[in-house]
Amino acid sequence: MRSAFKGNESDPKTISLIVVYSLAKALAISPLEVYKMPVSLVKDLLSVHFVAEELKAEEIEKATKGIK
C-alpha cells in the first residue's frame, strides 16, 4: 500500500481504494458518495485536488525559504 501511495505500480484494487480514500478525504464526504460518482467526475476532481495540493506545497516552500 505504501509503495502505491508513492507512485509505484500496484494492483487495480489498491489504486481504486487510494483514489476513493483521497477524494473522500479531500471533499470531506463518505467514500460511498465517491462510488456513486461517474468516473469522469472522479478523475476531474482528483486532478483539481492534485493541482491545489501542488500549489499549497509551493507556497509552503516559498514561506519556509523566506524564514531562513
Image (spheres, rainbow, N blue to C red):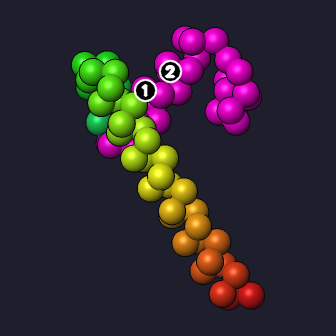
Question: Going by the picture, which residue comes out furthest to the bottom?
Answer: 67
* Residue 21 inside the magenta-drawn segment: yes
State whether residue 25 appears in this view.
no
| Residue assigned mark 1 | 20
**Residue displayed at 58% across by 17% down:** 14
**Residue displayed at 58% across by 67% down:** 58
Q: What predominant SS class does the magenta segment belong to?
A: helix
Contact? badges 2 and 1 (CB < 8 Å): yes
Tell me: residue 14, above or below residue 30.
above
**In which quadrant of the rendered view does residue 32 lie?**
top left
Query: What is the quadrant of the C terminus in the image?
Result: bottom right
Label 2, residues with CA under 10 Å away: few <14, some 14-19, many ≥20: few
**Residue 3 drawn at (x, y percent):** 73, 28
Tell me: residue 42, above or below residue 49.
above
State whether residue 43 appears in this view.
yes
**Residue displayed at 35% across by 39% down:** 45
**Residue 15 drawn at (x, y percent):** 56, 21
Query: What is the quadrant of the N terminus in the image?
Result: top right
Label 1, residues with CA under 10 Å away: few <14, some 14-19, many ≥20: many
- The front one of 26 and 52 is 52
Number of numbered callouts drawn: 2
Q: Is residue 22 left or right of residue 36?
A: right
**Residue type, mark 2 in image:** Leu
| Residue assigned mark 2 | 17
- The magenta segment is 1-28
Q: Is residue 53 left or right of residue 2?
A: left
**Disc 2 secondary structure class:** helix
**Residue type, mark 1 in image:** Val
**Disc 1 secondary structure class:** helix
